Amino acid sequence: MSLPPPVSATTPFKHHPAESGLTESLVRKVIVSFYENVRDDALLGPIFSEAIGENWDSHIERVARFWLTATRLGSGYDGRNFMPAHRRHSSIRADHLSHWLALFRATAAHHCPPQAALALVDIAERMAETLQISLARRDIGQ
């Protein structure tokens, strides 16, 4: 299995959150709606339920803090546990990320003006690339 090239931290964002019209309330609305869609999704629902258990509200708040920090609309997300939290669940696999991204793109497009959706999707794509690398390495034993 070949790994995709790493994401460069120096690669500029294609769409800047500060210029997109994003607000804290809009980000939270997208995240809550996305997780409602995830729960109903035949592929992702069971995976997330296994990983999150009954802790959906606290998970959604933690994810909202991630997005607010990533968009520079807030702070307070501690990312030290991000990758280990995903790697420890074998049900979370790299091949699920394209489906996750498609659902996220659709949710962002539904709720956001075009520039705001593009800014969120830009962040989501970077996150998915990083997760894909880490999960692929986990799955080949690195």
Image (tube, rainbow, N blue to C red):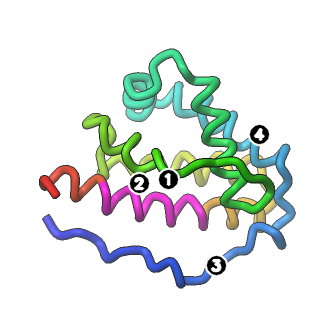
The local crowd at label 1, few if under 14, some if 14 to 19, many if 20 or more residues have their Cα within 10 Å, is: some
Q: Which residue is mark 2?
A: 98
Identity, as a three-letter code, of the amino acid under mark 2: Ser
Q: Which residue is mark 4?
A: 29
Picture quarter containing residue 48?
Answer: top left
The local crowd at label 3, few if under 14, some if 14 to 19, many if 20 or more residues have their Cα within 10 Å, is: few
Identity, as a three-letter code, of the amino acid under mark 3: Lys
* For the residues bearing labels 1 and 2, Cβ distance under 8 angstroms: yes
- The residue lying at 67 percent from left, 34 percent from top is 61
- The residue lying at 53 percent from left, 26 percent from top is 39
In the image, which is nearer the foreground, mark 1 or mark 3? Answer: 3
In the image, which is nearer the foreground, mark 4 or mark 2? Answer: 4
Q: Which residue is mark 3?
A: 14
Q: Which residue is mark 1?
A: 101
Disc 4 to disc 2, how far (Cα)? 22 Å
* For the residues bearing labels 3 and 2, Cβ distance under 8 angstroms: no
